[in-house]
Amino acid sequence: MTVNEEQTHIIAAIVEHKPGVLYRVSNMFRRRNFNIESISVGPIEPRDLARMTITVRGDDRTVEQVIKQLAKLIDVVKVSQLHSNNTVTRELALIKVYSPDTRSRSDIINYVNIFRASVIDVSTDSMIIEITGDSDKIDAFIELMKSFGVKEIARTGITALSRGAKSLKVG
Amino acid sequence: MVEMSGAEAIVEALKREKVEVIFGIIGGAIMPVYDVLLDSGIRHILVRHEQCAAHAADGYARASGKPGVCMATSGPGATNLVTGITTAYMDSSPIIAITGQVNRRSANTAYMIGRDAFQEADIIGITTPITKYNYQLTSASEVPRVVKEAFYIATTGRPGPVLLDLPKDVQAERAEIEFPEKVEIRGYKPVTDPHPLQVKKAADALLNAERPVILAGGGVILSNAFPELLEVAEFLMAPVVTTFMGKGAIPENHPLSLGCIGMHGSRVANSVILDADVLLAVGTRFGDRSTGTLDTFCRDTRIIHVDIDSAEIGKNVDVDIPIVADAKKALKAIREALTLRAERKKETAWFRRIKELKEQYEDTLEPGGEDLRPTRVLKELRKIIPEDSIATTEVGQNQMWASLYFKAYKPRTFISSGGLGTMGFGFPAAIGAKTACPDKFVVDIAGDGSFRMTEQELATSVVEDIPVTVVILNNSTLGMVAQWQRLFFDKRYVAVHLSGIPDFVRLAEAYGAQGVRVGSLEEFVKAVKEAMRLDVTTVIDVPIPPEEDVFPMVPPGKSLKEMIEG
């Protein structure tokens, strides 16, 4: 059944790990008027391959087109959609928060413990927190941190794998 | 393993791909390759603008079915190819574009990539969205593999242009070279065999159809699927309409041929396709100029869509039975499945209806009026030139008149820029086609506006002795735009008058070509016959009525049902 409303979809692609491939992929998205919400890339085994996890917003027709257009790129070796009910997704964020006094520091550490995040750097008036989880969890945490004052955020974008036996492999 | 330079490796690899001719212009960054080319036995045709090198390679490819090769230097040479490469990309034509590039490394000067060197352009970045693939070579030793891959990618699956960018130091570098026999690209495995289950479904749907119609696109021509197309059509007694790019996929004098659909399609084709209960669409991307508005295009029709590019299936039109395959293989499989299931159809009620409609509409197509109306000129041209002559067209009114009034009897004999709509394509493409088919009469059906964009290739045609004939339907206007201004902009003419400049007869003569201006249909016939007899580059200037429109027409944003007549 086709869903015509816009949703976020996760696409995983195994690509040649060589210069210019990210350009070819992002160029295709721009040219076809698709929007990338996030993209994360890293090398896999064998080392001449890399895995891209791309999240896009669109209806089912759009995501089908995205997948087909990705598959058509010579440097994309394999591509598939990861369905949310059968996929684990994680994102990592580093957040620098104002913590000028002991009170704010202990409050922040409380939240950090509840969210199973960790403090990875402390200076006189700020702390850096590392948090991993799905994007909703990170959004919620950032929302809480806003009351202390967020200085800087770095998010990796989603990376994801299918659960169980299913896997995206080459060969 | 042999020791040779990158330039020698390129030329040797081209010879191994059976390249016989290259269209190009030399320049600083490609000189080492040209130096090797001199003794290679490969013919080089020096064009007068790089855009035309790409168009000529494209025309060569479309006429012959073999990949065409063009070459240019770095920077402006490379960027001048861009329109030609895009034209080939939009019409899925297999061309190989070779460009020089500044050095990758340079010991003691800034003449190198990334330093904004003289005549440096990022042609890889520029051509990524308009090529099927492109390569920048990084060493002489990888040349043979890359060239082999380039030809493989360009000519298999859905064909398209591939660009090779050759840094000058890679051309000069010497290395141990080995030429591979096989190609292995793990991310590129085009599917060519149709899925048997889908073929069965298609055959059942076609046999149960009351009003089956076949839509043939450019893919039928690219895969040389003409006999298979005709067999399926004749088996089902199903009428065949084509897209503009599919023109020539079926002989247009065949009883089942109804001509092109689309904005300037024939009345009968546009009406019949909307009546179909089952549509077999082969090798078409359902482009906007073919379908009219999508919400009125074959909404209640069961659509079988055969295409080698799976991304085309469901892109513009919802499909009931998708078949991802080569057109030739799919049509052959469908034909076999039909034969297993049923007898060849005899005269059906649907066929009788088609015949009636065809006769009825054909009458309205018979042009009358002044002697040199373009419709009459083109019908006359068709009568006097051999059936296997190749016609190219420019873009605009000339192209749409040709589509409607100049029948194509054989595949690969009608060559035009359909997707990109590149004015100036027809003349260099004609030179490319004539190079591929020197024994055929080649004519460019032109408008004066388009011809002006590449007329300098008269020099190429004359000097290289590649005689083609240009028929200029001359209304001294950018005619199609003027037609839109008449119809949709309240006759507010802006930027369309060309002021009768230049005198095309004298222009032709200045290049050493033959120029003729005709004043009547009789003189036109004489001029064409003379061009055929003399076999020299000829420009025939045909003054046509300046306000003549192309009809019928589906206005932009309308349904194929809503055709307007003059």
Image: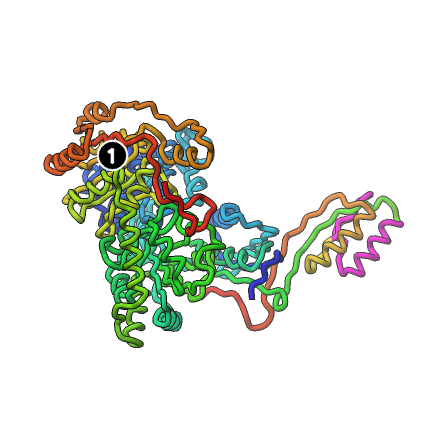
Identify the residue at image location x=15%, y=46%.
B386
Bin the neighbour count of mark 1 within 10 Å (Cα to Cα): few under 14, some 14-19, many 20 and up.
few
Magenta segment: does it hold B132?
A: no
Q: Position of residue A110 (x, y in %)?
A: 84, 57
Q: What residue range appears in magenta? A: A103-129
Magenta segment: does it hold A121?
A: yes
Can residue B10 be seen in the rendering of this structure?
no
Check the image and report above or below for A25 versus B202: above
Image quarter where the N terminus of chain A lies is bottom right
Label 1's element? loop
Q: Position of residue B281 (x, y in %)?
A: 37, 60
Check the image and report above or below for B451 versus B262: above
**Which residue matches tag 1?**
B370
Q: Position of residue B323 (x, y in %)?
A: 39, 65
Identify the residue at image location x=25%, y=70%.
B346
Identify the residue at image location x=36%, y=40%.
B566
Query: How many marks can you see?
Result: 1
Identify the residue at image location x=23%, y=31%.
B542
Q: Is residue A165 left or right of residue B97?
A: right
Give the quarter of the image for residue B551: top left
